[in-house]
Image: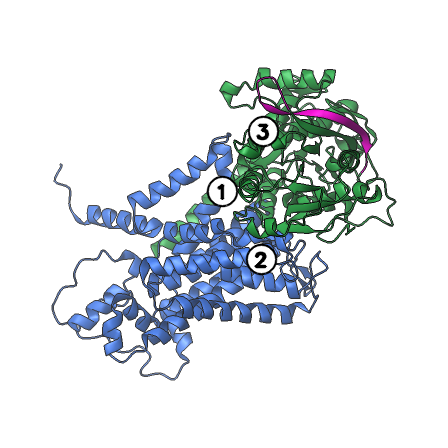
Chain colours: A green, B blue
Amino acid sequence: MKLDKRFVLKSLAGAAMAAALSTGWAQSGQPVKIGLLATLEGPFAAGGADGMRGAELAVKQRNGTVAGRPVQIIKASSDAKPDVAVNAARKLVEQDKVDILVGPLSGGEGIAIKDYSKTQPQVTFINGGSGAQATTLDNPSPNFFRFNTEGAQWMVGLGDAALKKGYKRVMVIAEDYAFPYSQVQGFMTEFCKGGGKVPVKAWVPLGGKDYSSVIARIPKDVDALLLVLGGADAVNFLNQYESAGGDKPLLGGSITVSQDVLNYRGKKRDSLVGTLSAGPLADAYDGKEWKAFVEDYKKNYPVSAGGYPSPSLFAYVYYVNMKAALDGLEAVKGDLGNNHAKYREALAKMTLKTPNGDVKLDENRQAIGTTFVTEVVKDAQGNLHNKVLRKVDNVNQLLGMNKADFKIGSRDVPNCP
Amino acid sequence: MSAAQWRKAMNSAATGSAGRLPSTETGRPAPAPAIPVEPDPYADSDAPRWLKFLWRHVSTRHVLTLLGLLVFPFVVSPFVTFQIGAQTLVLGLVALSLTLLAGYGGMVSLAQMTIAGIAGYTVAILGSSGTALSLGWHWSVVVVFALAIGTVASVVVGWLSVRTEGIYTIMITLAMGVAFYYLALQNYTVFNGFQGFQRVFPPTVLDIDWRQPLAFYFLSLAFAMAGYFFVKYLIRAPFGIALQGIRDNPRRMNALGYNVTAHRVAAYAVSGFIAAVAGVLLVWYNGLITPGSVGTSWLINILVIAVLGGMKHPIGPFLGALVFVLLQTFAVDVIDRERFNLVIGGAFLAIVLFSPDGLLGLWSHLSGRLRRARDVSSPVR
């Protein structure tokens, strides 16, 4: 049992080292420590890496200093699982002693980090990319801020656009978890109000391979299908739908009609033209600030260095949230005293300038922002891309309803068969 | 006494000295001279057996280790206490259940995290959480149910996989683990699907909030030590010896009249109980449980922890868990890039490559080398 002694020595040595490491910085004039949490592992690894790029870009635009204090970024990674995200956040907050934490990336993680933020009142938490409604609607935390809009807000405007196209009855095919629920809610709230009907909703498992039973359930009399599936699932569905001889027009969720779906090669490809979709950003938007942001992104992260041809959704939302963190610091001249009281007030009252227009926060510290409705078009070379159909401003989290009537989206909410 | 010693004792009617420790076994064949068999230490006394067992087996080393473990949380930050200390103990306890099965029973089950997850889900479903689905029963009832359900689930896993060997055991237990993952992922009426359960916290008992780092550390320590000593005791009890016999030669044990299947299923039940205890602690540690907590990556992580530490002794899984947790927590600081998983994978590979028996094997190898170096006088003057 000499082993045990070794174990003790090891743990004591480790403990001593940790104690030496954890002596914190003094407050002012010292670097501002910002923790950055994204998914560098697991299913969203590519998105997480791009999210990190977006956040770094916001720091680079200020040359790494804010209000005369250097910005020190400490990164941590999770794999889209809430428990791993909380462990990583705990390390940043309690071990590295960050002042501000920007993250996490996915919905379940966001709710877990929001719950954790309540136990750490000395740190300000700003969302990274997560888009679950419950994070800010249900039991919100006073030190958790979200400057990006979420899944339901991203679909506002799509319902009207579908009605304009003459779709009266739409079947929903969506993955079976929180994010698609809120996407479907964002679409249906408007669509049902305008007199549309959703006779069937099919909830399919995430990463499903076989859609034959769903395809068999598609009623003859629907005008279109709303697909809220991740890129690979959408391609799978399209392949099977095509071989089953389907010909209904499509509507897409925010992450459905992405470049990988548009590059899909099949007979059905040309029928993708005209597919409507909505989201917080549009590659082809020609706003001045947006174009400047895309140029800046391309300059710093060219495709040769692993960047994307155009910033992804995650790069954009991480950029916006990190920019909010830094603009807030600038506004209070780097003063984080008194448990960030001034800083949090500045964040809550701030009008944030983003590449896609101004963002303000509501009383739950949730963004009110812009949504783009897009349509797939074919260019002269025969490539498909998204064209901006309409820009909807000031979309709030309650989708224009009053608080009493609003229920968080689920499998059965909303409903208009 | 290790299985190797036991076998030698059986074969040559001469035991190795019982005081020698399995971890310092070098695997040399025992010398043949007929040493008189040591008398049974429990034969001529009426003190309770367990007390004598403790008296015989607790030495200075154990006391020192215990002191170290008790002092540890008072010299480090709460973060290290909770995230390194408590997490190591809890994950070590899950891996201990696998070590019992694989190291002493020869059955590599990948479903240990599933058992822990079933117990954790039971706590979340029957107890209180931030989700409306939870029934909000009293914690004591909930914990009893969680341990019972975890043990029963483990018996079911054992029953289904007990007649398979080697790779097939791994496959069938992995299949059951993945099946449970998908059940938890897609069932919304009981398991709350993708969201799982948030805000599952330990109860406040005796006016102590058991989620405070110090309190939770000692709670985990108590159960980890209980598990450790229980397994140490078990592997020398007749049941454990029979289990090791079954591991080494099931046909011979069968011929000797041991019911192989019953022993194996019983081993699953015992290890399931340990895993269930760890599962309850784990859900309290994380404060939440989601399908991701019982996904394939965690099933495999438990195997990694057990193999990393070494399966020759119950301390192995805890050592493995310590290395695993330290790497998971701090590898990101070593290479502050998207490549930190290389550090984790590299360290695991290095350990397993240089020592098939994990850290324990490394230790016995080194101490063997050192002892030889001390024994042999140097030819260089």
Please give the residue where the numbered disc 3 appears in the rendered image. Answer: A259
Say what amino acid the circle numbered 1 marks.
Answer: Gln
Task: Read off the chain for label 3.
Answer: A
Are the residues at dot 1 and dot 3 in contact (C-beta closer than 8 Å)?
Answer: no
- Main secondary structure type of the part rendered in magenta: strand
Question: Distance between the Cα atoms at labels 1 and 3?
Answer: 34 Å
Above or below: residue A284 compared with residue B331? above
Question: Distance between the Cα atoms at labels 3 and 2?
Answer: 32 Å
- Find the magenta span and give its range: A378-396
Instruction: Judge depth for marks 1 and 2 and give the one in front.
Output: 2
Are the residues at dot 3 and dot 2 in contact (C-beta closer than 8 Å)?
Answer: no
Near mark 1 (Cα within 10 A), the count class, few <14, some 14-19 or many ≥20, is: some
Return the mark for residue B378.
none
Near mark 3 (Cα within 10 A), the count class, few <14, some 14-19 or many ≥20, is: few
Please give the residue where the numbered disc 1 appears in the rendered image. Answer: B328
Residue A416 x, y percent position in the rendering = 79, 50
Say what amino acid the circle numbered 3 marks.
Answer: Gln
Specify whether disc 1 shares its chain with disc 2: yes
Residue A352 x, y percent position in the rendering = 78, 26
Please give the residue where the numbered disc 2 appears in the rendered image. Answer: B184
Q: Nearer the viewer, residue B172 or B55?
A: B172
Say what amino acid the circle numbered 2 marks.
Answer: Ala
